[in-house]
Image: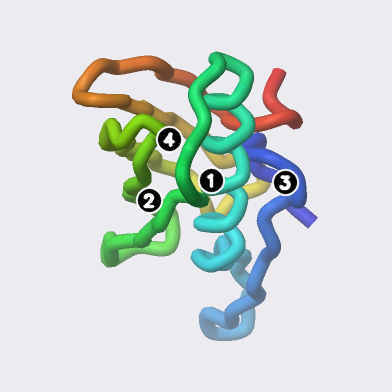
Amino acid sequence: MRRFAVAVPAVLLVLTMSGCTPMERVSEGAYRNAVTGGTVDELKAQGIELRARPECKTPETGTASVVRVNCTAQTRTGEPVAVEGTASQADTGRPRESYVVTVGGREVLRKDCLGSGCR
């Protein structure tokens, strides 16, 4: 099982078939959940608490090798929170991740992983 660096639990995989060769693809729902949990952990570590867990969407990219995630939330004080993430090479054993989190329009985090499992 391939693990993304975004939070625990690890992102689940879905096996798809392309001809006779199996190909791994990230489960978008599991990826959204991992990003949500990682965002909550990262912001909490900075003293920023959210009203509720972020709501995330994974826009279609047209390829299994790139998965994007966009999330929104609000802080307890009502400031808007936005998360933009990308996992490239998502159909390999070593995906490359990138995340930017803004609060009230200010960038508060730019990392290649999120959450408690982040190095």
In the rendering, at what x and y percent does residue 26 appear?
A: 57, 61
Q: Which residue is mark 4?
A: 76
Residue placed at 39% from the left, 41% from the top?
86
Q: Residue 76 sits in which quadrant?
A: top left
Residue placed at 49% from the left, 23% from the top?
48
Precedes in sequence: disc 4 or disc 1:
1
Residue at the far left: name it: 105
18 w.r.t. 110: above or below: below
Q: Residues within 10 Å of mark 1 (few under 14, many from 20)?
A: many
Precedes in sequence: disc 1 or disc 3:
3
Q: Quadrant of the N terminus?
A: bottom right
Q: Nearer the viewer, residue 48 or 11?
A: 48
For marks 4 and 3, give the one nearer the viewer: 4
Q: Quadrant of the C terminus?
A: top right
Q: Residues within 10 Å of mark 4 (few under 14, many from 20)?
A: few
**Number of numbered callouts drawn:** 4
Instruction: Kindly report the distance in space between the C-alpha atoms of the residues bearing marks 4 and 1.
Output: 19 Å
Three-letter code, disc 4: Arg
Q: Which residue is mark 1?
A: 35
